Amino acid sequence: MDVRHDPAQTHANDIAMREMRAVLDGQRRGFSALLPFAGPAIVVSVAYMDPGNFATNIQAGARYGYGLLWVVLVANIVAVLLQALSAKLGIVTGRNLAELCREQFPLPLVWLMWAVSEIAAMATDLAEFLGGAIGLSLIFKWPLWAGMVITAIVTYVLLMLERSGFRKLELAIGALVGVVGLSYLLELFIAPVDWAEAGRQLLMPRLQDSQALLLAAGILGATVMPHALFLHSGLTQYRFPSTCEAERKRVLRFSNIEVTIALGIAGLINIAMVLMAAAAFHAGDRHVAEIQSAYHSLTPLLGHAAAVIFLVSLIASGLSSSAVGTMAGQLVMQGFVGFTIPLWLRRLATMLPSFVVIYLGVNATQALVLSQVVLSIALPFPMLALIWFVSSKRTMGAYRVRSSTLLATVASAIFILALNTLLLLKA
């Protein structure tokens, strides 16, 4: 991330650093010792419950009931593994993934990865921006373009919070994540979930047809996101004030705990999305394929409260994930090509495709799903680069991953590549 010199930001960051130093010096113990280190994984977890997840999970639950729950589970396990490695890369090397690619890869490959990453950033922002706009337009009865304008303004305001220190932005994003989680907890109390069938399908991997394959790739793209792999290493590279190997090991332990908790909660929320969609829309052949129709169908099926809760969670998801996506885009550009553009210009550039999609009359929900497929296809680039660096003794030294972790990571990569290959062959 670019370093700012705003006095308020510097003061707030100094306070956060002192809190972490107190933990490393043994002055804080127990659960309270984890709190100063919380933040990076919470910010990144937004990418795992953004509007793209809403679109793919609603379609998965409505069309196949509980049949694709296993994809959500596998995707989340892979996400925890990869994000933990991304955080570790930043902590150990003091560099983020994009910077390491620029420094160690051939220039043509660097430019290719940057181009793919920028396309992925646009696809990411398309999903996040459209999701927030859809939610606002439905709950306030506004035209979609008005919802898009409000989403752009609010996300820009969120990003401005970073000027007062990273803690304020993290707390704001954490609060929005809490809204999404609480919303789906309430939905599960309202929706008539068949828990026995859901548990059975969760542990039964199968793809029913080519449409299920498309949705599986979309779920994967919406869960394990390219920009999240870049961003996590950037959030941890300067953050933790370890001065020796013992402290660095403690920081890595705190990081792994935070990743497991934050992304575990994100995974439960994704599962809850599919459960709600399956319970509300799949029975009786009520195949709901769009976010808008999901909202309108929820009122007669589960009541007005369920429909409003659904929209509140969608808006919170769209606003938070759009802000995080812009942060990631800035980091990717700075890492690969060594410069940044003004935040407002970055925000404008990444949201323009959303306005184009709406102007051309493209179905918003279908655009969300296809954007997630684009992300799934783009994912191997940062994923393979991450595996390369964390397994390199030159880069990680004594902290390179163990053989068992490397095996699990490579297996995850093979799974993702196989799914993408099948998707392309079916196209």
Image (spheres, rainbow, N blue to C red):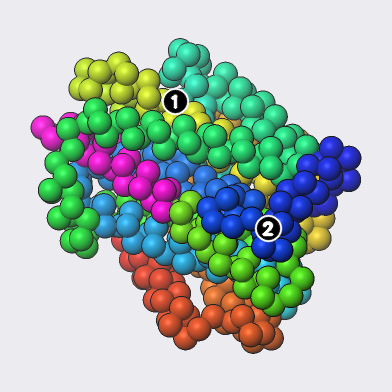
Secondary structure beneath dot 1 equals: helix
Number of the label disc, if any, that sits on residue 66: none
Q: Is residue 122 visible?
A: no
Residue name at image x 69 percent, y 42 percent: 167
Q: Which residue is mark 1?
A: 312
Residue 303's quadrant in the figure? top left
- Picture layout, residue 178 above or below residue 14: above
Left or right relative to 211: residue 260? right
On the image, which quarter does residue 338 sit in? bottom right
Residue 381, percent from left and from top: 56, 68
Nearer the N terminus, badge 1 or badge 2?
2
Residue drawn at 41 percent across, 25 percent down: 311
Looking at the rendering, the stretch of residues picked out in magenta corresponds to 264-289
**Mark 1 surroundings: few (<14), some (14-19) or many (≥20) residues within 10 A:** many
Return the x and y of residue 231 as percentages of the image width and height: 63, 56
> 271 or 53: which is nearer to us?
271
